[in-house]
Image (tube, rainbow, N blue to C red):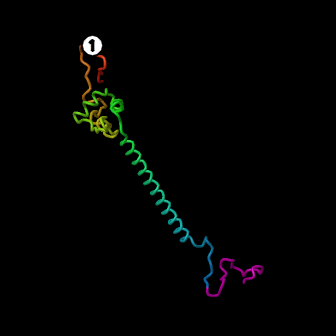
C-alpha cells in the first residue's frame, strides 16, 4: 500500500504514479481528448438512435389512430351529416356505388374512410361540389313542400 502522506516527487501527480511496477501510469482526463471525443461521438450516436426510435413509434401510433378513425362505422344519418346530404341521397349513392356500403343485419352502414373518400371524389380542386345545383339567372319557382322529403344542397 502506498503512503499518501509523503510528498510527491516534483512533476508527478497521483494520476502518474504507477500502482505496481508492471502497470502503465494513468493519465489525467484532460490529457486524453481523443477518448473524450470518441465517448461523445458514441453518446451522440445513441441519442440519435433513441430519438429515431421514438419518432418511428410516434408515427406508428399516429397511423394506427388514423386507421382506427377511418374504420369507424357510421349510420346513414351520420354519413349524411358528414357529407352534407340528406339520408335518401346517401342511400342513392350507395345504390349507384358512389359510396361503398355494407349491411349489418338489415341496416346499411358505412366506414368513415370510405365516406371521406367519396366526399373527396365529389369535390372539385377549387372546393366546389361536382354535382351541386347551380344558381340560374332567372328567379326560382316556389317549390311545393312535401312532408318527409328532403332537398339536397
Q: Quadrant of residue 52?
A: bottom left
Instruction: Answer with the quarter of the image where residue 119 lies.
Output: top left
Q: Position of residue 62 (x, y in %)?
A: 42, 47
> What is the magenta range?
1-22
User: Residue 63, how many percent across, how many down?
Assistant: 39, 48
- Asked if 60 appears above or below 47 in the picture, the reply is above
**Residue carrying label 1:** 144
Compared across the picture, whether 118 is left or right of 4 comes to: left
- x, y (%) of residue 120? 30, 36
Q: Is residue 37 magenta?
A: no
Question: Is residue 63 left or right of 129 when viewed as pictured?
Answer: right
- Residue at x 25% of width, y 34% of height: 94
- Pick whichever, 39 or 95, lies toward us: 95
Residue 29 drawn above or below residue 62: below
Residue 1 lies left or right of residue 119; in this view the side is right
Q: Residue at x 62, y 78 (%)?
A: 26
Amino acid at each position: 500500500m502506498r503512503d499518501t502522506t509523503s510528498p510527491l516527487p516534483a512533476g508527478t501527480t497521483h494520476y502518474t504514479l504507477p500502482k505496481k511496477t508492471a502497470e502503465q501510469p494513468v493519465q489525467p482526463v484532460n490529457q486524453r481528448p481523443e477518448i473524450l471525443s470518441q465517448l461523445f461521438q458514441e453518446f451522440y450516436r445513441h441519442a440519435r438512435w433513441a430519438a429515431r426510435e421514438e419518432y418511428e413509434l410516434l408515427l406508428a401510433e399516429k397511423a394506427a389512430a388514423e386507421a382506427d378513425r377511418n374504420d369507424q362505422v357510421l349510420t346513414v344519418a351520420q354519413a349524411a351529416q358528414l357529407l352534407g346530404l340528406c339520408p335518401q341521397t346517401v342511400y342513392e349513392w350507395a345504390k349507384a356505388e358512389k359510396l361503398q356500403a355494407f349491411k349489418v343485419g338489415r341496416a346499411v352502414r358505412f366506414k368513415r374512410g370510405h365516406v371521406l373518400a367519396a366526399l373527396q371524389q365529389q369535390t372539385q380542386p377549387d372546393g366546389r361540389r361536382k354535382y351541386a345545383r347551380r344558381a340560374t339567372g332567372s328567379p326560382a319557382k316556389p317549390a311545393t313542400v312535401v312532408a318527409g322529403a328532403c332537398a339536397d344542397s
